[in-house]
Image (cartoon, coloured by chain):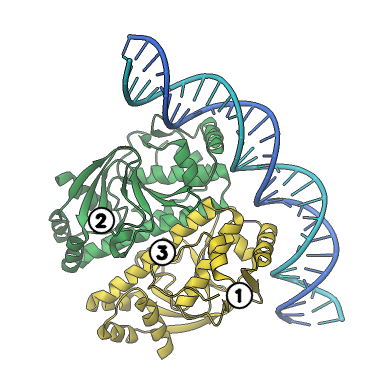
Chain colours: A green, B yellow, C cyan, D blue
DNA sequence: CGCTTTCTTGAGACGTATCAAGAGTTGTGG
DNA sequence: CCACAACTCTTGATACGTCTCAAGAAAGCG
């Protein structure tokens, strides 16, 4: 599975300069590839993980399950992300992971990772950085869901996802895959489904973006960015030219 | 400043077994101690940090400033916490840090930390763990502010802070310092000040807790925990007996 | 002792949740 | 291939909770 390893190298390379030796170490890791159907869980709250997951293709989500039965999505992960590097040092998962659309995920034994970290500290630091970028995304989600009005909140989410998809080279033209239902959007942004729908309709009407058939289309990036009060600093990615639209 | 170093050792020891050599390495670090007045900033959004901060006493907060001028608090830190270990690998701070009440903070040069990490990888892993615990707290805040009703939300926050204060040995009897204003509570939980006040009044009336004179008093822990839908798993701390009250 | 800030309480407006029903879509089995 | 079931999306009407605005009380500070 050459591809899976390269996907990880490309992603870590977004924020960390990797030496040839680091890449070699990564290519030597055991990847167990598995495919998942939409909405299939692959790590559950309470699990004691011995593997780390790498998104090889598709989208993956983290979520909390509440006492009330409600579900809260915490973050989405694209190709190249390590959605549970958080689990590396954790006894018991405090959140679950599921596929959003169809997704393939590679599992890497923690044991091998720790050995690789010892041999190539730079690799370890790169994964650490990855977890810190995740944390920055979490922080932004706190702010987004707590302090921004509904429309801004939704626009911000799409800005982030589009920007990250672009960095991961998943954007063709002005569109990228976005297999997320209105219900899931509501469980991400903390709004009722009816409101999700109406807010999304407003965004469509603004002409800045569209979401249909599991695809996000950004028609006016600058306008969407403005609507979403979005500034990509917190993603700590290499500078990239803004989307053309 | 023996005390400052020990505070860090005690905190890291909450989740990581440190060898005598690790502690020695920590004690050898340069700590520059500074005192701050309530609400004084000491790291600003946009800064390029060269030091990590350690809370030696008092409480410290992280916050976002929004385009709209609104402030959103992201997390609070108690004695022993490294509130910006997040900044270790970050080019530019995406959030600010300020003292809540009066606080003293030790600053440690990044350069020294990296050298210490190289010499004692366990120490590096301990700090990594610390950042992952922070991330777990962020995740919980997303859920708290997005999916829980106001009263539950507020109760959950106080549960977390009390539980962490207890782990940090800052609880005497059934109370601990909590120098936070209603305005700040509102900017933490995403609610208007008037609502903060009314919700807090409800919590007081329930008899589970009180907040006055900058002190949190927990009168019925189990009741407060129930009201807050709180389960401490996500804090990933060593098991401790539940508060007696 | 006044000045400022924080807290408290009330009344009304507004926005979002809730409830409900129908349309559109997808998948399945007859 | 069609019919039906299940699910997602869409839209409307209503209820409720929270925000906003406002004003007064209490507490901290010079």
Which is in the foreground here, disc 1 or disc 2? Answer: 1
- Residue B217: give its label: 1
Please give the residue where the numbered disc 2 appears in the rendered image.
A52
Q: Is A63 drawn above or below residue A183 in the view shown?
A: below
Q: Chain of mark 1?
A: B
Please give the residue where the numbered disc 3 appears in the rendered image.
B233
Kind of element beneath mark 3: helix
Asked which quadrant contains residue A206, the reply is top right
Per the model, the C-alpha gap separating discs 2 and 3 is 20 Å
Work out which quarter of the rendered image holds the C terminus of chain A and state it.
top left
Per the model, the C-alpha gap separating discs 1 and 2 is 41 Å
Asked which quadrant contains residue B94, the reply is bottom left
Point out residue A22 in the picture as x, y percentages from the top left corner.
17, 60
Kind of element beneath mark 2: strand
Point out residue D29 in the picture as x, y percentages from the top left corner.
71, 80
Residue ID at (69%, 60%): B198
């Amino acid at each position: 599975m050459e591809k899976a390893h390269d996907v990880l190298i490309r992603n870590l390379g977004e924020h960390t300069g990797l030496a040839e030796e680091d890449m070699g170490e990564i290519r030597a890791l055991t990847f167990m590839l598995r495919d998942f159907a939409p909405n299939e869980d692959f790590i559950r709250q309470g699990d004691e993980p011995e593997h780390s997951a790498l998104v090889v293709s598709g989208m993956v989500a983290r979520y909390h399950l509440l006492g009330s039965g409600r579900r809260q999505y915490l973050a989405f992960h694209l190709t190249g992300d390590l959605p549970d590097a958080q689990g590396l040092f954790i006894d018991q998962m405090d959140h679950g992971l599921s596929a959003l659309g169809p997704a393939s995920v590679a599992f890497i034994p923690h044991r091998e990772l720790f050995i690789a970290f010892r041999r190539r500290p730079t690799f370890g630091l790169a994964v650490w950085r990855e977890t810190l970028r995740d944390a920055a995304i979490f922080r932004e989600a706190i702010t987004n869901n707590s302090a921004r009005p509904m429309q801004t909140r939704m626009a911000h989410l799409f800005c982030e996802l589009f920007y990250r998809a672009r960095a991961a080279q998943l954007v063709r033209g002005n569109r990228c895959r976005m297999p997320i239902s209105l219900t899931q959007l509501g469980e991400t942004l903390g709004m009722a489904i009816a409101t999700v729908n109406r807010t999304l309709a407003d965004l469509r009407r603004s002409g800045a973006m569209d979401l249909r058939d599991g695809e996000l289309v950004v028609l006016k990036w600058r306008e969407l960015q403005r609507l979403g009060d979005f500034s990509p600093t917190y993603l700590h990615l290499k500078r990239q030219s803004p989307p053309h639209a």
